[in-house]
Amino acid sequence: MFSHILGFPRIGRNRELKQAVERFQRGKSDPAALRQVADDLKQQHWQDQIHAGLSLITTGDFALYDHVLDTLCLLGLVPKRFDHHKGPVPPATYFRMARGDRARNIPAMEMTKWFDTNYHYIVPELGEPPRLDLHLEPMLADINAVKALGHTPKPVLLGPVSLVHLAKKLSPQQRQNRLDALTEAYLAILKALGDLVPWLQLDEPVLALDLDEATRETARAVWRRLNQAGTGPNLLLAGYFAPYADNRKTLLQADFAGIHLDLVRGRDDLDPMLAALPRETTLSLGLVNGRNIWKTDLNDAFQVVDNVVARVGEQRVMVASSCSLLHAPIDLTAETELDKDLVAGMAFAVQKCAEVALLAHPASPERDRMVAKNQEDLTRRRKAGQVVNPEIRRRLEQVTETDLTRHSPFPKRKRAQAAGLNLPLLPTTTIGSFPQTKKIRAKRRAFKAGKCSAGEYRAFLEEEIRATIQRQEELGLDVLVHGESERNDMVEYFGEQLDGFCFTQNGWVQSYGNRCVKPPIIFGDVARPNPMTVGWMNFARSCTNKPIKAMLTGPVTLLCWSFVREDLPRETVCRQLALAVRDEVADLERAGFPMIQIDEAALREGMPLRRVDQNIYLAWAVDAFRLASAGVADQTQIHTHMCYSAFNEIIEWIAKLDADVISIECSRGGMKLLNAFADFAYPNDVGPGVYDIHSPRVPDLAEIVRLLQAALQHIPAEQLWVNPDCGLKTRNWDECTPALEQMVQAARQVRLHL
Ligand code: GLN
Ligand code: ZN
């Protein structure tokens, strides 16, 4: 039985890739040095797979920045503005595509989230008719390198249907035309591969989405052509992140030699797939979760394997990870400080490879011993300290609909709040964070390294808060914030203070290119032993007479940006988080803070890929926000903020949050987003971002005035707030001071005409 993974993390155990890419970008190394690091990493990843005992070694999953970008380069699909005509794409051009070229004023290609993961890919631009120019040298070199090690390589390639589907907007005709051209290119690739490898993994992740019949029809035709090429390796079609569901039929009609199933997310596919599987087709069973850090229940997994083997025969079964391991950290053995009982239940990428390899073993006493050990480990993890907190379980059971509902409807609350707050029309505020300067980061590092005392660190942060408040007073903002200088990250800061969370030392996961994140782990029942923000907020208030808006991260965002335990439904974990936030909100209210913002930056991105799952998610996500926020009196004003702003289809859910004020990212679309709010007659207050904080550019007065006037076309003045698009932590003071000056000025100017 073959065993394989769909891809290995690229960054290296010590984030070598990040360092190498940054060195190169700073001009401190040359293409040869960069290539050396890449080659070493690839070798290491192959060795990891070989050592684990996998029978197919994955190639083509590595990328210096992003695998979609690599696929474009392999095909020679470089947009015109990068001025590349023929031949392999040199690293400098490659990075220019990813990051743009400031000096020459060439914008980067867009980047966006890879399905429902936190990985970001470069969005293909296929607007110009493609001038295909294949560069298969790197692909072939990797294949030969694995062969030289005496092992069987299995290259991975992103499929043509997904490549076109993920590309920037194309007309149906362009789409067809691009697909035709790409099909020819992929046929040429198959020909070049000949009988060099037994299998090629063709990734078509679009199969996780709701597709219309026309798209399916086209996809089937393209895939059939590839499968009927009569030359080249067998194609193993790989979709993941959701069940194939109603795309299954298309897939089965496309003549693939092998089909991969994500049995973590798509367990429901298995039976119908087995029932309809053509007689020759191989099934790849994705049983090891590529998106989490927990051990697989091998007992359960072997049952599936044995069952499928009994049905179709061993020759037609492969075992695999559910998706690429790109989304998991690399090696658990680097974690020396985690609780040993918890570690017993964890597996990172290297350990997942071993799990997959083991699953290909036929029954034997050795196998039984491994399974027994696995079950012991899982029990140990379940019984680890702090996993179950009876008090929290009891509290959750007692939550009722009343706990999710504010005392009075919004109009009455609005009057109560207005009386206490005394704000002008179009009140100005910010989203929460102010620049995280080098100075702040250096001080935090020193503190964490024990080179600066807690007292000194606190005094330093208080000075930062005081200065940030003073700047806001000088700018004339109406509602002030403390600036979040004490927070490294909006999830980590809270996770560190909550029971049920733990943190790895080295559990990095690639977010995009050279950027990595280290998500916290929610392993046990969440509880809040002590107030988390009240102290800093009290200090901030002591610096000013203006109203201060307190700043929290919401339950859905805490959930979405963590690795989450699998022994409870996500929805239950989210409710536990909501209770913890609710307690913090209550403490802030008791301490006299009339405005509390609960950020839900991740609410939209946490949406499942399939429409049938979306409403279920939205219902519990909205309930969690309400549980966190609805415990306050009418006079207390609840704010929320959301970044990603494709709200059109979910506006009714946004309304159900019943936040008194919502601030959203809006400036780039010229306020068009507000259409959704206007059409829905959204009743509560809205703060559409009036300038883009992602760019260092300082907006001018007239531009903001225009945007505010556009906003007033959609939203009555009584409901409108004025704020930037998002937090300012990635900007510097020289950028955000003049920008906020213009913003305040613009609000004043527009007020005069109301
Ligand atoms: N309050 C956070 C900040 O200002 C919100 C960040 C976010 O939405 N991503 O940074
Ligand atoms: Zn934001």
Image (cartoon, rainbow, N blue to C red):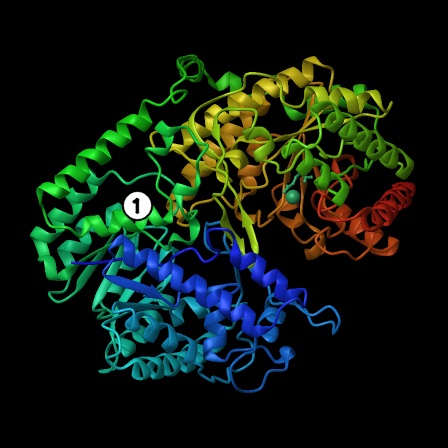
Left or right side of 144 for 473 = right
Residue at the far front: name it.
451
The structure residue drawn at horizontal position 62% and vertical position 18%, both measured from the top left corner, is: 531
Which is nearer the eye, 156 or 46? 46
Q: Secondary structure at mark 1?
A: loop
Image coordinates for residue 192, horizontal then vertical, percent: 32, 83
Measuring from the top left, give residue 715's x and y in whole percent.
73, 42
Left or right: where 568 falls relative to 166: left
Is residue 473 shown left or right of residue 717? right
Residue 682 seen by the camera? no
With respect to residue 151, does 137 lie above or below?
Answer: below
Q: Residue at x 43, y 18 (%)?
A: 396
Farthest-out residue, bottom: 86
736 relative to 144, above or below: above
Return the x and y of residue 255 as percentages of the image width and height.
21, 71
Residue highlighted by disc 1: 264
